[in-house]
Amino acid sequence: MKKTLYNLAKSVLLLCALTVFSCQSSTEEGTIASTHPELAEQLAEDSVTMPISENQNPDLYQRYQITEEEYTRSGQFDVGDMYRGQMAPLDESSHTDIRTYRTALNKGLEEGVNFAGRYTVVTVGCGTNCQQHYVVDRETGKVLDKLQSNIGAKYASNSRLFIINPPDSTAVYGECRDCTPEAYEFENNQFRKLPAAE
């Protein structure tokens, strides 16, 4: 019995060693050049003329970025106290969109307070390059306001500042007028738009 187990273990080790050796000793065989030579030739001929990450509007991007940093660093939107009470469930009578997005809103509320000290922002997709951002009061469960963006939003749990379409160096602002960054302050249960960058 011991001899059988010894031989079995020896066979398994030999098989593992052969597998490792065969994986390490592969050559040109199995590469894209050998299995798809036409594709390999086409890839060799094609060249990318402009990388995706190239900043196509550096001046505009820089202006948006500076404005966002000024808002963020000013401290005027900071929240002093964080809500620590019981999290209210979604008040389904507080907004007309709830029937459509009930599941997504309830799932998003699991995150807890993530905006302005006592609110949860729940983001729901509304199509290609479209997001709806709902603000839910965690003390009452009411949906208070919403904003729509095209390339996302930036916000923090300790600030009333909410930026839709935050500055992005890869955005082509000339071709996407709805991608312009916009800053809002959340006060009195609604968003108030802040002045745009000059």
Image (cartoon, helix red, strand yellow):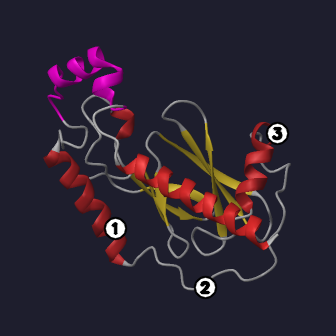
Q: Residue at x 27, y 43 (%)?
A: 170
| As drawn, 46 above or below 149 | above
Front disc: 1 or 3: 3
Q: Nearer the viewer, residue 76 or 62?
A: 62
**Label 2 with label 1: CB-CB less than 8 Å:** no
> Residue beneath label 2, please?
81
Indicate which disc, 2 or 3, sits on the residue closer to the N terminus. 2
Mark 1 Cα within 10 Å, few/some/many (few <14, many 20+)? some
Front disc: 2 or 3: 3
Under mark 3, the amino acid is: Arg
Q: Would you say residue 86 sits in the magenta stretch?
A: no
Residue 182 at x, y percent in the picture: 39, 50
Indicate which disc, 2 or 1, sits on the residue closer to the N terminus. 1
Under mark 1, the amino acid is: Tyr
Indicate which disc, 1 or 3, sits on the residue closer to the N terminus. 1
| As drawn, 162 above or below 150 | below
Q: In the rendering, which numbered label is found on residue 99?
A: 3
Side (left or right) of 119 relative to 27 = right
Q: Residue at x 46, y 59 (%)?
A: 154
Q: In the rendering, which numbered label is found on residue 71?
A: 1
Q: Secondary structure at mark 3?
A: helix
